[in-house]
Image (spheres, rainbow, N blue to C red):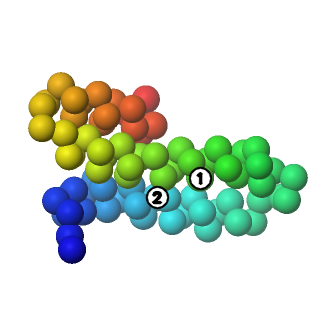
């Protein structure tokens, strides 16, 4: 099953970014696992999650609210 947001190039690129962040942070020191590594990974995943959530909203106002939460919008 394919969701409509999965066809969006911006969502696909956000997922690609998350993969890059996960691979890059895998080599971070163990003492950063619960600090910087975790924070970077959560931020990277939240981009595609907010795009997906915003795409499912029926009103433009709700969608804009979720899109603006994406870390890439800041």
28 over 47 or under it: above or below: below
Q: Nearer the viewer, residue 50 or 74?
A: 50
Q: For this view, does 61 lie left or right of residue 71?
A: left
Q: Which mark is residue 41?
A: 1
The span from disc 2 to disc 1 (Cα, nearest Å) is 10 Å
Counting from the top left corner in percent of width and height, residue 57 is at 19, 39
61 over 12 or under it: above or below: above
Question: Quick one: SS at disc 1?
Answer: helix
Neighbour tally class for label 1: few under 14, some 14-19, many 20 plus, Cα within 10 Å = some
Residue in view at x 53 percent, y 64 percent: 20
Counting from the top left corner in percent of width and height, residue 46 is at 46, 46
- Residue on which disc 2 sits: 17
Which quadrant holds the N terminus? bottom left
Residue in view at x 22 percent, y 34 percent: 63
User: Of all residues shown, which one is farthest toward the right?
Assistant: 31
Between circles 2 and 1, the one closer to the viewer is: 1
Q: For this view, does 10 lie left or right of residue 57?
A: right
Question: Quick one: SS at disc 2?
Answer: helix
Neighbour tally class for label 2: few under 14, some 14-19, many 20 plus, Cα within 10 Å = some
User: Of all residues shown, which one is farthest toward the bottom?
Assistant: 1
């Amino acid at each position: 099953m394919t969701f409509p947001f999965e066809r969006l190039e911006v969502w696909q690129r956000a997922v690609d970014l998350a993969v890059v962040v996960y691979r890059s942070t895998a080599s971070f020191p163990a003492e950063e696992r619960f600090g910087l590594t975790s924070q970077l990974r959560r931020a990277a995943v939240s981009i595609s999650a907010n795009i997906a959530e915003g795409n499912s909203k029926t009103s433009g106002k709700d969608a804009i609210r979720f899109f603006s939460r994406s870390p890439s919008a800041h």
